[in-house]
Image (cartoon, grey):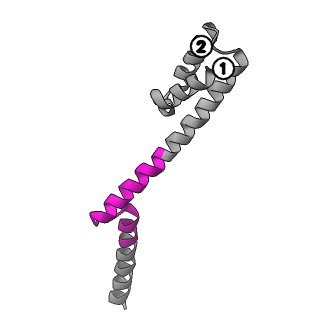
Amino acid sequence: MKEVLKNFMYAGIGAAFMTKEKIEELKSELIAKGKMSQEEGRQFVDDLLRKSEKAKDQLDLWITKRVEDRVKQLNLVTKDEMAELQRKIEELQVAINKDKAE
């Protein structure tokens, strides 16, 4: 029963994005209904929080990759590329001013 409940939580209601407060709330409900012990509840919360954090990290990586791919497809200049161009322009301005002074 506990495994079925865990699987339902992970798959059915998007456990990856539950807040710690919601997870604690669910744990308290399950303990109150006799569905799990205090220790099982603690393990459940720890496991769910760990999986939630991992899922969020994976989603962040996925989104970052997709955005980077779209930027490349659209041939947009990135912030780093713009900063590098600005640095080169400043170097050229210094060189030009130096030549004018001589």
Label 1 sits on residue: 41
Please, what is the three-letter code of the amino acid marked with disc 1?
Gly
Q: Seen in the image, is 22 located left or right of residue 47?
A: left
> Could you classify mark 2 by the number of other residues whose Cα lies within 10 Å: few (under 14), some (14-19), or many (20 or more)?
some
Q: Is residue 59 above or below residue 26?
A: below
* Position of residue 97 measured from the top left corner of the image (x, y, whole percent): 34, 83
The quadrant in which residue 41 appears is: top right
Name the residue located 29 percent from the left edge and 64 percent from the top edge.
73
Q: Seen in the image, is 46 located left or right of residue 65?
A: right
Q: Nearer the viewer, residue 40 or 99?
A: 40
Label 2 sits on residue: 30
Q: Secondary structure at mark 2?
A: helix
* Position of residue 22 measured from the top left corner of the image (x, y, whole percent): 52, 21
Marks 1,2: beta carbons within 8 A: yes
> In the image, is residue 78 part of the stretch drawn in magenta?
yes
Residue range (magenta): 59-85
Q: Seen in the image, is 16 located left or right of residue 84?
A: right
Q: Nearer the viewer, residue 39 or 102?
A: 39
Q: Is residue 56 above or below residue 66?
A: above
View extreme (right): residue: 39
Q: Seen in the image, is 11 located left or right of residue 97?
A: right
* Position of residue 83 measured from the top left corner of the image (x, y, whole percent): 39, 66
Name the N-terminal-most of marks 1 and 2: 2
